[in-house]
């Protein structure tokens, strides 16, 4: 009989502890972010998608050697006139990248030719889309310090606009009828 009442007491005590936490948070103001139109500010050390700037790259292959997941590859050809390497192509496989930032830290160029952006909204529909390929003879995605603009991955009919309130990253506006 004593064990029965002790069990009721302990159960009621646990229930009241849980209700106390619930009641404490019930009257606090809600923090709601209207996601496509508003975005939370990201920390300074946030590691988003990698951006690559072929005009800055000196083809030293330090990022390729530093990458533990082997997601970066490049090919460079020696230019006989300048005795320097010219970049032929550069590939990043986002399916393998673990966002460790070793490639950015080892890059000797100032500013960095490969760096993490604040972009966190990348979506891929096919496995082949994970591989980004920069070539010298093909138009390339725009890279920026604040965020990477990936218009290739936007839904059909969406327009791209830069909004300073959204931490500089790109946000699609309302879909256009087509």
Image (spheres, rainbow, N blue to C red):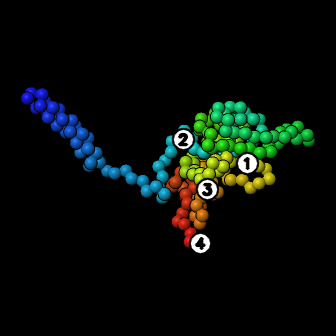
| Disc 1 element | strand
Instruction: Give the x, y percent position of residue 11.
Output: 18, 35
Residue where numbered disc 2 is placed: 46
Label annotation for residue 153:
3
**Neighbour tally class for label 2: few under 14, some 14-19, many 20 plus, Cα within 10 Å:** few
Measuring 15% from the left and 31% from the top, which residue is drawn there? 7
**Neighbour tally class for label 1: few under 14, some 14-19, many 20 plus, Cα within 10 Å:** many
Task: Tell me the distance, in whole angstroms, between the alpha carbons under discs 3 and 2.
Answer: 21 Å
Q: Nearer the viewer, residue 131 or 23?
A: 131
Label annotation for residue 134:
1
Q: Earlier in the sequence, mark 1 or mark 2?
A: 2
Residue where numbered disc 4 is placed: 178
Marks 1 and 2: CB-CB under 8 Å? no
**Neighbour tally class for label 4: few under 14, some 14-19, many 20 plus, Cα within 10 Å:** few
The quarter of the image holding the C terminus is bottom right
**Neighbour tally class for label 3: few under 14, some 14-19, many 20 plus, Cα within 10 Å:** few
Instruction: Give the x, y percent position of residue 152.
Output: 64, 57
Instruction: Give the x, y percent position of residue 171.
Output: 55, 57
Q: Nearer the viewer, residue 157 or 10?
A: 10
Q: Earlier in the sequence, mark 3 or mark 2?
A: 2
Q: Earlier in the sequence, mark 4 or mark 3?
A: 3
In the picture, measured across the screen, residue 61 lies left or right of residue 22, that is: right
Q: Earlier in the sequence, mark 1 or mark 3?
A: 1
Task: Tell me the distance, in whole angstroms, between the alpha carbons under discs 1 and 2.
Answer: 24 Å
| Viewer can see residue 178 | yes
């Amino acid at each position: 009989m004593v064990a029965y009442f002790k069990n009721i007491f302990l159960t009621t005590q646990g229930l009241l502890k849980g209700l106390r936490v619930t009641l404490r948070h019930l009257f606090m103001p809600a923090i709601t972010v209207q996601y496509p139109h508003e975005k939370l500010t990201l920390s300074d050390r946030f590691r988003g998608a990698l951006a690559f700037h072929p005009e800055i790259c000196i083809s030293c292959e330090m990022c390729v050697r530093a990458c533990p997941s082997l997601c970066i590859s490049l090919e460079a050809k020696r230019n006989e006139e300048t005795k320097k390497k010219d970049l032929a192509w550069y590939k990043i496989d986002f399916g393998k990248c673990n966002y460790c930032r070793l490639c950015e830290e080892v890059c000797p160029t100032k500013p960095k030719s490969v760096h993490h952006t604040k972009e966190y909204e990348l979506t891929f529909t096919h496995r082949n889309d994970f591989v980004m390929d920069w070539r010298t003879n093909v138009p390339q995605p725009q890279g920026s310090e604040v965020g990477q603009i990936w218009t290739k991955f936007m839904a059909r009919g969406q327009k791209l606009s830069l909004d300073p309130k959204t931490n500089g990253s790109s946000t699609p506006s309302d879909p256009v009828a087509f």
